[in-house]
Image (spheres, rainbow, N blue to C red):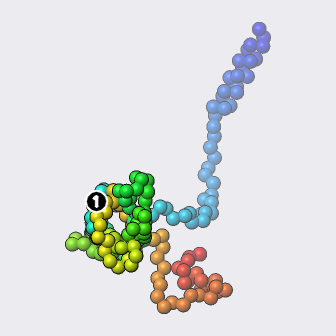
Amino acid sequence: MKTFPKTALLLLLAVTLFACKKEGPAGPQGVPGPQGPQGPAEVLSYTFGARTFTGSENYVLKGLTQAKADSSLILAYYNPANELASAWYPVPGLGSGSAYATRYLVYGGQQSNEYIFSLRVMKAEDQKTPYALPLTFTKLKIFIVPPGKIIPGGKKAKPDPDDYYAVKEYYGIED
């Protein structure tokens, strides 16, 4: 029976010690870490349903400005009706069975915040003559991918690769 008070006393002491928590003053600010990677780009995605057409078809891209269209990569893919729903063909490129070729033109619409994606279907043999048979594309997806960084081109000569500072200036890299 004498061990019970000792055990209870040790238990009470342990609970008291663990319950008390003292915090000291905040330490000095550390050195900032390196710049992290750029976040995900604001990619615009347009999806259109089934359309049957001959030769060409226009798709309106609402919310696309000239600045965004001029500086972005435009990618398009379609699913022909005679293919599996999971088959995606790129534009430009040869179509199903190499029977036709696709290409596109993008130009400003009637409103300032819209562009027209004009899909053209040509004969595969010469890729100049419009394809005369009706085609059905069950889906068309268009992606507008902005650049992570724009580097001005032009007549600026490439820098000497042995000159660190010239390379930094040419590519617009900061320390």
Residue at image position (24%, 72%) is 109
- Crowding at mark 1 (Cα within 10 Å: few <14, some 14-19, many 20+): some
Which quadrant is home to the N terminus?
Answer: top right
Most distant residue in the right direction: 2
Residue at 31% over, 74% down: 130
| Three-letter amino acid code at the position of disc 1 | Arg
Callout 1 secondary element: strand
Residue 140 in the image, given as x and y percentages of width and height: 35, 60
**Residue 135 at least partly seen:** yes
Question: In this orientation, which residue lies closer to the viewer: 149 or 107?
Answer: 107
Compared to residue 85, the image places residue 57 above or below, namely: below
Q: How many marks?
A: 1
Considering only vertical position in the picture, is 142 above or below 112? above
Observer-nearest residue: 103 or 149? 103
Residue of label 1: 51
Where residue 52 appears, as percent x and y from the top left, is 27, 61
Quadrant in the rendering for residue 122 = bottom left
Residue shown at 64%/85% (left/top)?
161
> Compared with residue 34, is residue 153 higher up or lower down, i.e. above or below?
below
Identity of the residue drawn at 59% across and 83% down: 167
